[in-house]
Image (cartoon, helix red, strand yellow):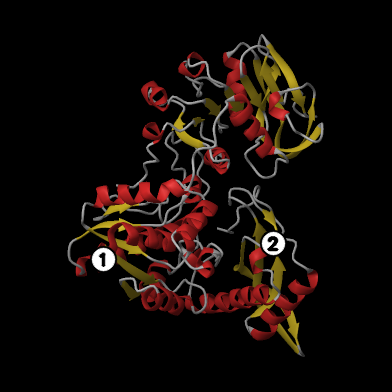
Amino acid sequence: MSVQSKLDIKSKNIDTILVLDFGSQYTQLIARRIRESDVYSEILPWDVDIKKIEDINPKGIILSGGPESVTDIHTPRAPKIVFDLQVPILGICYGMQTLAEQMGGQVTTSEKKEFGFSVLNIEDNSKLFTGSSSEAIDVWMSHGDKVETLPNDFKLIASTESAPIAAMEHSSKPIYALQFHPEVTHTKGGKLILDNFIFEICSCKPDWKLDDLISSRIKEIKDITNGEKVLLGLSGGVDSSVTAALLSKAIGENLVCVFVDNGLLRKNEAEEVVQTFKNEMDLNLFKVDAQKIFLRHLKGIEDPEQKRKIIGRTFIDVFDAEAAKLENIDFLAQGTIYPDVIESSESESKEARVIKSHHNVGGLPEEMKLKLVEPLRDLFKDEVRRLGSQLDLPEIILNRHPFPGPGLGVRILGEVNEKKIKILQEADSIFIEELREADLYDSVSQAFAVFLPIKSVGVVGDERRYSEVIALRAVETVDFMTANWAYLPHEFLDKVSRRIVNEIEDVSRVVYDISGKPPATIEWE
């Protein structure tokens, strides 16, 4: 059982933009961008019961992208009620293609799929582009089909070299469509386009505030837990920390925090967690030393998905065992957030493609003995941080870089063992230490070291060394759905590299990852 319900918008008379999900990995990001502008957004699957759509009474509807092709038989289509409601409609990528096909246009499969940057040329005036400072905009494409022929009563408003019909609008109705993705940060002016849709076209009021969420979630948690005790897996990361603060406000002493030291944490992290949360924040915290258990289960395992699921399963097993020692524990709380759910294909429509499983969502066994509480499940990382600030959590916790649930288990490529963990902990510690020393830590969104499954020849002093290779990764991002690699100074990278090679005997080479997301992911596994 999860705490997933949104604000009770019906009682608050809040303007709402409905996003119909066709399975895109970016669907949740559309809603995030809208909420960023203080307009409430709800996501429903494309084939949802029409009564749910009627109950929301949306001011506008956005049709998301998706992995299917409208040229195939039995692929998703926008339901009839979308058109019957007579509210503004915006189709994005697949949403544009199904609009075109359903309204009499023609969609064809492109000879060349387009993934990445493209230059959008504005061909005609449109409310979508109001305020744009240029008639040529860098946009992000991700499609294999394209609109070949405009539907009746539609006009062309923008094009690209590979997609002559890259944006269109109805001549008399507020129906618009874009082949590119305005929701990703790679599209310059994408937020302006979405703001034009929600404010200029849909006439929404910016009346949804994150502040309202705290009181709402506290009430939800109280109602669901009903005075029973909740066991929280506290890692010390932003997500679990904010979850702890929120639960503490809601249920007080009924919150029991258990910190599982799986041996896959950053250097000295276990000690820091106990000091911060038990000694300074006075939470009811128990520490479980489980490194040997995790390493035993991971022995001989190289596949990243297997490692994630093993770590997730072991994590829950340890929790079940710990809960059995405690009285009247009925709920397990987790700091699951939107990106975890998105990349684990936990969309309501089940159409999204799996990128990775997350231990919070992909590794939970069906026979788990505890009911599940996830109060941050529909929030993005920056929203979580804002929530934490309103809950008076220390800045050092809120601004800490994200750390994957499986820990170093997915930053060690290949089999995990104690020696590799120690090498990676040291390398990662050096990297983070130097970032802080150079005042660069807060300028990147996430930074870490990766243990690669290869060895390389090096020369240290007069000694020839055939040993391990460490990769450094640093990215800049707003939402963690897309990211750019960080342009760190060469002198800085040189210093970090020299320190790692000189101070860690088992490392002979350091490389720097310059891949963006997409096409890469932020983590290596």
Front residue of 522/274: it is 274
Residue 66 x %, y %: 56, 32
Quadrant of the image occupied by residue 391: bottom left
Q: Is residue 426 visible?
A: yes
Q: Which residue in the structure is indicated by mark 1?
A: 253
Label 1 residue SS: helix
Label 2 residue SS: loop
Q: Which residue in the structure is indicated by mark 2?
A: 513
Front residue of 41/444: it is 41
Query: Of the residues shown, which amino acid type is indicated by label 1?
Result: Glu
Front residue of 110/170: it is 170
Quadrant of the image occupied by residue 140: top right
| Residue positioned most to the top | 152
Residue 446 x %, y %: 61, 62
Q: Is residue 93 visible?
A: no
Front residue of 352/2: it is 2
Alpha-carbon neighbours of circle 1 within 10 Å: few (<14), some, or many (≥20)?
few
Q: Is residue 206 above or below residue 301?
A: above
Q: Tell me how many marks there are.
A: 2
Of pointers 2 and 1, the one earlier in the residue sequence: 1
Quadrant of the image occupied by residue 133: top right
